[in-house]
Amino acid sequence: MKALILAAGEGTRMMPLTATLPKPLLPVAGKPCIRHTIDALVKAGVKDITYIVGWQRKEIQAYLESIKGVKATFIEQKERSGTAKAVGMARDVMTEPFLCLNGDVIATATALKAMAQAHRKQERPVIAVAEVLEPERYGVVKFNAASGIVEDIIEKSQRPPSRCINTGLYLFTPKIFEAIDQTGQSPRGEYELTESILRLGPEERPYALQLKAPYIDISVPWDLLAANEFLMKGMRSKSGKGQVEKGVTVHGALQLGRGSVVKTGTYIEGNVIVGEDTRIGPRTYIRGSTYIGNRCHIGASVEVKNCIIMDETNVPHHNYVGDSVIGRRCNLGAGTKVANLRLDGRTITSFVKRKPVNTGLRKLGVIMGDDVKTGINASINVGAVIGEGSIIGLGAVATGWIEPKSQIF
C-alpha cells in the first residue's frame, strides 16, 4: 500500500515558529514532526510515500529526500486552495487503495495497521475517529452506531452530536477522486476534503474506525509540548557519542547526541533529549520532558522545564525557562526569566494569528520565534508570543503578541 502525506500548508496557526521553518519540520522529541509519521508508516509496512508540498518546498523536500529506505514522490501544490484539491493532485499516482494523512497529525504504526485491517474487513474506505473532551473545537464525525458507516462530518459545531472527531487519518480508494471532481468551494473559499467524503456513493462511504491507539494533532504551538511529552514516554537512555562528566545526576532517561557534553553539577530529572554539539552546564537543572537541539548552550545556574529549545539557541546564565517553545538562534541574556504560571492559578491565554486563545493550560511560558534576543534581567509573561527577530531589552517586560522584529525596551 502507498501513502499520501499533505504537507503544503503555510502553518499560519503555528506562527511565529513557521515563519522560517516548514511546519512538518518543527522538532518534537528529537525529530521533525513529519519524521515520526514516516517512521510509523514504515513500521506499518508502507515505504512508498507521496508528498504534497508547497510552502518552503525546497527545504522540506531536501529533508524528505535524505530519508533512507523510503521511496519518495513529490507533487507541488502551487495554489493552496484546500485539502480536496491537494488530494486530487495525486490521482495519477494513487491507482489503488491508499493511506492519506494530514502532515500535522502524528499517528502510531498500531493505528495505521488497524486502518488497513478495517479496510480489508469492511471493504470500503476508512476514516479514523477519536473521542475528545472538547469536540466543538474540531470536525465531528456522525456515524451509524450499528454499521459504523459515516453519515455526516460537522465542522466546529456548538452542539456536536458526539465526541468522536475527524483525526485527519484516512484510507481511500481511487473513487475519492471522482468525489473531489464534484466538490465545490466552501463558504471560506476552499475545496474541503470532508465535503468530498460526503459526496461518495453509499457503497463508498467510509467506515469510522474508533482509534484505541493515541494520535497527536499539532494545530497550535503549545500542541508541540504535549506531543513532545507523549513521544518521550518510555524512552531509554542513549549516550551516543556524547560525554557525561562526573558529578552529573540523572533521574530518568537521557539521550545525548554526538559531540555534546553534560558538565559537572548538572541535575536531570525526567526524560531529556539533547542534540549534537550542545553544551549543558555546569550546575544546570533540567526537568520534565525537554528537548534541546543541536549546537545549543544551556549554561550555569539555568533551570529548564518541559521545553523545546531549537538549534543554535543559548540559555547561558541564571535563566528560568518553563513550558516553552524557543526557536532557532535565540539568545537569552543573563537573568532572563519566563513566567509559566498565573498568580491566580487560572488557565493561560496565548495567541494564534494575533488573536487571544484560552489554551486550557495552567502552565505555559513563551512561544518564541527564531533569532530573538533578550537583555539581562528581561521578563517574559505567561502565554507571550514573540515574533522572529525581536529584541527584548535590558530589564524589559514582554507580554501578549509581539510582532516580528519588534524592539521592547
Image (cartoon, rainbow, N blue to C red):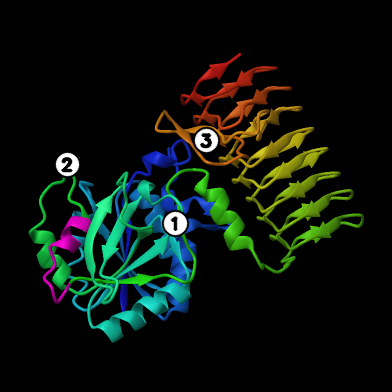
Q: Residues within 10 Å of mark 1 (few under 14, many from 20)?
A: some
**Residue 189 badge:** 2
Pinpoint residue 84: horizontal percent, then vertical percent: 20, 56
Pinpoint residue 3: horizontal percent, then vertical percent: 32, 71
Residue 262 seen in the current view: no
Which residue position is annotated with label 1? 132
Tell me the distance, in whole angstroms, between the alpha carbons under discs 2 and 1. 28 Å
Residue at 44% across, 56% down: 132
Labelled pair 2, 1 in contact (Cβ < 8 Å): no
Mark 3 / mark 2, whichever is N-terminal? 2
Q: Amino acid at mark 1?
A: Val
Which label sits in the foreground, 3 or 1?
A: 1
Q: Amino acid at mark 3?
A: Gly
Mark 3 / mark 1, whichever is N-terminal? 1
Q: Residues within 10 Å of mark 3 (few under 14, many from 20)?
A: many
Secondary structure beneath disc 2?
loop
Tell me the distance, in whole angstroms, between the alpha carbons under discs 3 and 2. 30 Å
Pinpoint residue 202: horizontal percent, then vertical percent: 13, 73
Number of numbered discs present?
Answer: 3
Query: For the magenta stretch, what is the residue range?
Result: 194-204
Pinpoint residue 210: horizontal percent, then vertical percent: 39, 70
Which label sits in the foreground, 2 or 1?
A: 1
Which residue position is annotated with label 3? 369
Mark 2 / mark 1, whichever is N-terminal? 1
Q: Amino acid at mark 2?
A: Gly
